[in-house]
Each structure stands twice: as C-alpha cells, then as structure tokens.
Amino acid sequence: MSTSLFKPSLSNLPRRWWMAPGASDLFVGLGPVLALLFVWEAAAQAEHSLFFPPPTAVFVRVYQLWLTGPADHLFLTDAAFRDVIPSIGRMLAGWCAALGIGILCGTVIGRSRVISDLLTPGIEFVRAVPSPALIPVFLILLGTETTMRVTLIAFGSVWPILLNTIDGVARIEPRLLDTARIFDFPRSATIFRVVLPFAAPKICAGARIATSTAVILMVVSELVASADGIGHHIVDAQQLFLMTDMWAGIVLLAGIGFTLNLIFSAFERRMLRWHFAARGRAERQ
Amino acid sequence: MPTSARWDTIGRYVLGLIGLLALAECVTRLELVPAIYLPHASTIMVRVWFLLQDRSFLENLLATLYVWAFALAVSTFISVPLAIALGSSDIAFRIACPIIDLIRPIPSVCLIPLAVIVWGQGLFTKIFLVTYAMTWPILYNGIYGVHDVDPVTIQSARCFGLRRAAVLRHVSLPSAAPFMFTGFRVAATVGLIVLIGVELLTGLDKGIGAFILHNSVTGGQAESVFAAAAIAGFLGLAINLGLEAVDRRAFLWSRVDRYE
C-alpha cells in the first residue's frame, strides 16, 4: 500500500520542524513561496491597488532605501544607519538585559521553594500587565530616550526567560544534585556545571520566545514619540501615504524576524548538541 | 501534596503578595518621582476600586472583552481546521510550511499602520490585528499536536480497519487536543496584550487601551493610567488561571502520561 510506505516519512521529519528551518527545507519550500509572490504580483499589477503595491516594487524599494550606500559602509545607506541599526541595537540590548536578569533571578528563585512561593503571585501579576499599556508609564518615568525603549523591550521579554529558567532549575533531578554533593562540588560549580546545563534547553526555549517579543516591543516602542527606527519609518511612511515605503518597512521587519530565528536555531543546535544527542538516544531505546 | 505543605504554599503566596504591596507602597512613598507622575500604591488600589464602579470605564472594559472574545473565536475557527489539514497531510504541510515561516515573523503591531490606512480606525482593524496575532499559537500547536501523534497508534487504528477520517476523529484529534488547547491558552493571553496595545497605539474608539491613552494625554490622571494597567493585569491573570484550570480538568488524562 502506497500510504504505508509514505507514512514513515512523516515520522522521519525533524521533530520540531519550526525550530529548525534547515537549508534543505528552505529550498524545498522556495517553490510555493515564489508561486505566492507571483500571484500577488499579478494581482497587484492588474488591480493597481493603492494599498497593496506589487512585491517587485516593494523589494526594489527595500534595496533603494537601505542597500545602495557606499562600499565602505557595507553598502548601507544613511537611512539604514538612521532606521535599522538603532532599532536592532536597542532590541539586542533589551534582549540581552532580559537574558541576564532572567537567568540570574530565575536561578535564585528556582533554587528555593520558599522564595519561589513568595514571589510567584507577584510575578504572575506583573507579567500579565500588557507591556504596551506601560508605555505611558515608562514615558513618564524614563522620558523619550533610548533608555525608555530598551527598558520596555527588556521588561516585556524577560518573562518567558525568567519563568522558563525557574521551571528548568526547579525541576532538576535530585540525583544530579546528590552526585554533585558527593563529589564535594563547590556551590558555584554546582550552579554552572550541573544546574544551569540541566536547565539550558528550557532557558533556550524561553530566550527564543523572548526574541519575537523583543521584535514586537521594538516596533511598539518606536511607534510613539520616536525620531528613528524601523517603527518610526513605517509610521512616517503611513502618514505621508508612501505605501511602497511602508511595505518596505514591513518586509524588512519580516526579514529581521526570519533571520533572527535562523541564527537562533543554528546557535541552539550548536549549544545544545549534547542535549539533542542524548534525547535522540533515549528515544531510540 | 499533603495538606500542611499546601497550606504552607498558600500562606507564602499571601505573604508574598502582602510583601509586594508593602514594598510598592514604600517605594512610591519615597517619592523619588513626584506623586503626580508615580502615585502611591494605595492610591492606585483605591482608584482601581472606583474605576470598577465607574460606568464609562466598565464600557471600555466590556468593549475590550467583546473584541477579544470575538477575535479568539474567529482565529480558532480559522486555525483549527487549517492545523488539522496541515498536520495530517504531508504534502500540504510541505507546501505551507515555508509560507508560514515567512509570514509569521511579521509582528502584528507593525501591521497597525497598514490596517489603519486600509480599513480606517474602526472595529474591523482591531479584530483583524488581534485575530492575526491569535492565529499563530493555535495553528502552531495544532500542527505540532496532529503531526506528533504516535505513528504506532495510527497504524494500529488502521490495522483495525479504520478509515482515514475515522483515524483522524478517534486517534489524531483526541491526542492533539491538549496541545491545541495550550495554543488556545497562549493565544488568549497574547491576544489580550496585542488588543490593548492596538487600542493604545491607535486610540481606537473604546477599550482599556484607549482609556489609558486618553488619561495619559490629558495629564494629571496618572492614577487612572496605573489603575487601568493594573486592571488589565488582573484580567490577563484571571484569563490565564481560568484556562489553566480548564486545561487541568479537561486534559488530566494526557498530563498523566506526559509527565509521569
């Protein structure tokens, strides 16, 4: 039966396919993407819609806006240095801050049952407050400068990292801790060589969720009272009715999100190689 | 868990909450920032109480909840069938996966300017943006759940002569349901955040976000801004805890073999 031959290939697909858009998947998938773009292009050319310019025009605009600079600036234009670089810089700064704070606090909280019980209600509440609702608050407290935007990004993206770290650290197998104690590990070695590696897969999952939160908050923070950044560019283009420019911004953001995801999964595969190897072995047994 | 340990935990929860409030009160009383900008925690709590009795605020709250519920329903109706189709057909999955991977990174908030210019500042804009944001988690978890059904189970079902549709109904769907529900839970919380963000950034007619925007623009209303943000937090917390309870009850059977 042809289906029974076909079925096993399903289970042979990478288990977490969306976490690992590998190169081969990308090439297999290029067909449908091109088809979609072609349909959009044809429809846009036929309709001459004001709001939905054809993709070719958008891509040309992306190129014109940001990639036609001099060679000694890596072909980036001044606009790229004004729009794109500050945005990405703030996002990375916020994300790194969230990572540091999240892992540090998460380890402390996760190691102690009492501390985690004391802090859980507070964390759950503060986390549930929508971060965009805090923009006015942050504007009042921190002004309109970079600090405000980085703080907002860090504040919003710290929660998945913090909660996953707490969870990962708290679920450590007692056997591992006992072993560390028998071998008389100093406290720091227990943390860095037993606890954190054990929690690493969970922390990575949290950090990955945090990247998309960080991108979203990067844009949100630039939609209000900003002078630069991709979000600012999009709002500016919208107010001047420059539809192609606006779409160029959206495409650029999608590109950034896609690239970040790609980089992160490569990094994760590299860093957690031992973990995936161990899990694969366990599954085969 | 033995009862005494459970009471310990609850006691610590209460203690932690009181401690947090006390800390917030102390920090705000220090007035590092003038109280006009950062009101005392107790003032905010009092304002929360009054807002919950204020008619116009309650209208805003209800407006937000309506849009939230409607968008959640729409995105569920879109993404559950799609997830089943993509999860059970290898070809459909291979075709759709790259397209999804390309669209998904577009953050919902960066579509705000586009939606506003195409559909105006109406209700539809809100619903579109929130539905967009809510669809991904349900779709993802749905595909993952349907895809990840134990192949042996499916093959056994087919050995017993079940057709494809019957396998889907009796094997794939039940075992994917817990994953889908997790996606639904994530969508419900994320959707609320996106919705309030959209209201806040566009000032769309009614809603908690619009209320916050309005009060932060008029000035001197910092208590209302903080109180509304706190109420939004309580709302998110209530939604999350409620759905968690439903999850625990409805999918107890799956939890047992997933974690034990």
Image: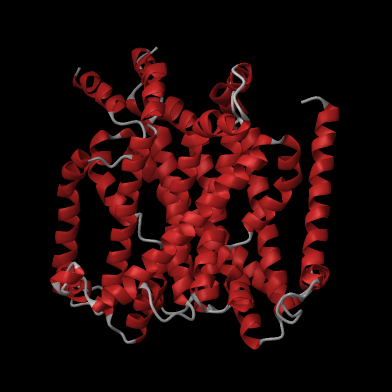
Q: Quadrant of the N terminus of chain B?
A: top right
Q: Quadrant of the C terminus of chain B?
A: top right
Q: Residue B79, position in %: x, y?
A: 41, 48
Does residue A275 sit above or below A250 in this rendering?
above
Residue drawn 16% across the image and 70% down it: A72
Tell me if A104 is positioned left or right of B4 in this view.
left
**Camera-side residue of B252 and A109:** A109
Q: Residue B106, position in %: x, y?
A: 35, 60
Q: Residue B255, position in %: x, y?
A: 58, 27
Residue drawn 44% across the image and 74% down it: A222
**Camera-side residue of B86 and B144:** B144
In this view of the protein, can residue B162 be seen by the observer?
yes
Q: Hey, which quadrant is residue B172 in on the image?
A: top left
Q: Hey, which quadrant is residue B144 in on the image?
A: top left
Q: Hey, which quadrant is residue B13 in on the image?
A: top right
**Camera-side residue of B203 and B58:** B203
